[in-house]
Amino acid sequence: MQEYKLFIGGEWTDSATDKTFYDINPATLDTLASLQVAGKDDVDRAVEAAWEAFKTWSETPPPKRAMVLFRAARILEERKEELAVLMTQEMGKVLPETRGDVQEAIDITLYAAGEGRRMLGETTTSELKDKFCMTVLQPIGVIGVITPWNFPMAIPAWKLMPALVAGNSIVMKPASDTPLLTIKLVEVLMEAGLSPGVINLVFGPGETVGKAVVHQPEIRAISFTGSLETGKWIMGECAKAMKRVSLELGGKNPIIIMGDADIDLAVDGVLWGAFGTTGQRCTAASRVIVHEEVKDEFTKRLLGRTQVLRIGNGLDPKTDVGPVINESQLSKIEKYIHIGQNEGANLLTGGKITNPGLPGFFFEPTIFTDVGPDMRIAQEEIFGPVVSLIPVSGLDEAIEVANNTSYGLSSSIYTRDISSAFRAIKKIEAGITYINSSTIGAEVHLSFGGVKGTGNGFREAGTDAIKEFTEVKAVYFDYSGKLQKAQID
Ligand code: NAP
């Protein structure tokens, strides 16, 4: 079993604590690695190393910084299969999905590398004669990055690659359930020529190590992806310190199925949205808002397809649905089944912890019908293979139900009517809307993020990727040779 120290200043160094924790395969419960837990002093050391490295890295021309990323993308491509297998062992999702996760990391690496020759500011006019105005993008400094476990390589890459090409240095705390894939990503970057200290890794519980990163006074900005609860706390702490913070949080993503929808296509989309990644995606379809006209037919076809899904080890090509991430997540899902039943929803199928001949954390794909829009199972993020069917009688009601949550990440509508599609685009409160496709499957050249409780206005990836990790400076160049006063002269 591999043992990991902390990665600080380009070296694997001992932590100041004598604590370790273990990285466990959620399907087999095999131990994959042990990792040292960082203390507050280690976080301080990591920040010091990052500021030291920042001096040179921020002065390196962006196209040269980008070359490191281009080389990293090539190495990731060569190791894609090996990394995907390791990811399935560490996180549980099925191999085609972990291949997709690594591919997303490759895509964002190439996309961010391309920004090395763009990083566009603006040139604009001046209200005064002989004066030139422009904006330039500058790195922020040392950034604290805190990530969840459900996209072990894609989410770290979404943050690291734009932050790096923009000239920042990083102190990163990956999720305790999936640190290995972050380590592999950083190893690839070092192999590609990243200077020591530009990325530093500290491991351990969010409650101690994550908090130490958030509270470290020399860290200028926090980039966080995770739950609403943690995100709210981080935002509050950053507000007290006037620290910049970008948040990508949870979702309670709706799929609307109208009476004119292609039902088989909608069933495909709901199956993939609800049970892909065992329902553990921020964009998972956890609410299906279905028109009364097609409710019975849709429910019958969805039930048939759900009951034949095969649960098992994600490395087995016959598996459709892998394990959930850990025991506490398994208990949380089970708790929500009782909540749904007590609220009066109808448990159509699933609802139980199961054992496909492995000791890990498996839960049956579950469908609730006759769900009311205000029930807790229709409001709170369960983050497991559980979908709630909510009947409605028209588009306005469907949109009202879709918007009736504190989240606003992804959304979808199945309809053949172009007016319904455009009304949904306009009226659904979400950062993403799909037409005739599921709620999942973002592409890296489009901005990603959500509204309301899903975030605080930032977007990742796409043309917004660089904005999250740069400060804008307005530059005024007066060549008139005299004092000119804007708004006065
Ligand atoms: P989480 O419990 O909030 O943890 C996320 C990260 O924060 C982990 O590294 C965790 O460390 C750390 N952490 C926990 N408490 C902390 C604290 N007080 N201060 C600083 N760091 C802290 O979320 P999760 O269960 O890992 O991830 C699932 C959630 O992420 C879901 O809500 C999902 O919707 C959301 N998510 C959102 C997006 C998006 O882009 N919008 C994408 C993926 C996932 P430990 O691992 O040590 O606990």
Image: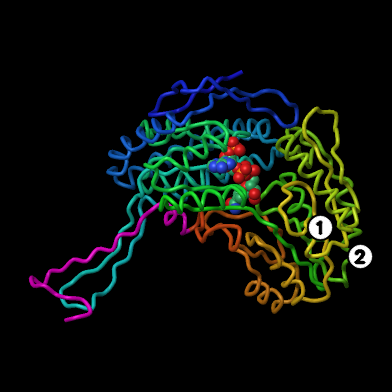
State yes or no: residue 473 in magenta.
yes
27 up-or-down from 385: above or below: above
Q: Quadrant of ligand 1?
A: top right
State yes or no: residue 342 in magenta.
no
> Mark number for residue 296?
2
Q: Amino acid at mark 1?
A: Ser
Note whether ligand 1 is within 8 Å of mark 1. Answer: no
Of residue 230 and residue 277, the one placed in the foreground of this image is 230
Q: Which residues are magenta?
A: 463-489
Identify the residue under disc 1. 388
- Which badge, 1 or 2, comes first in the chain's sequence? 2
Q: Quadrant of the N terminus?
A: top right
297 up-or-down from 273: above or below: below
Say left or right for 221 vs 375.
Answer: left
Q: Are marks 1 and 2 in contact (CB under 8 Å)?
A: no
12 up-or-down from 388: above or below: above
Q: Residue at x 72, y 32 (%)?
A: 26
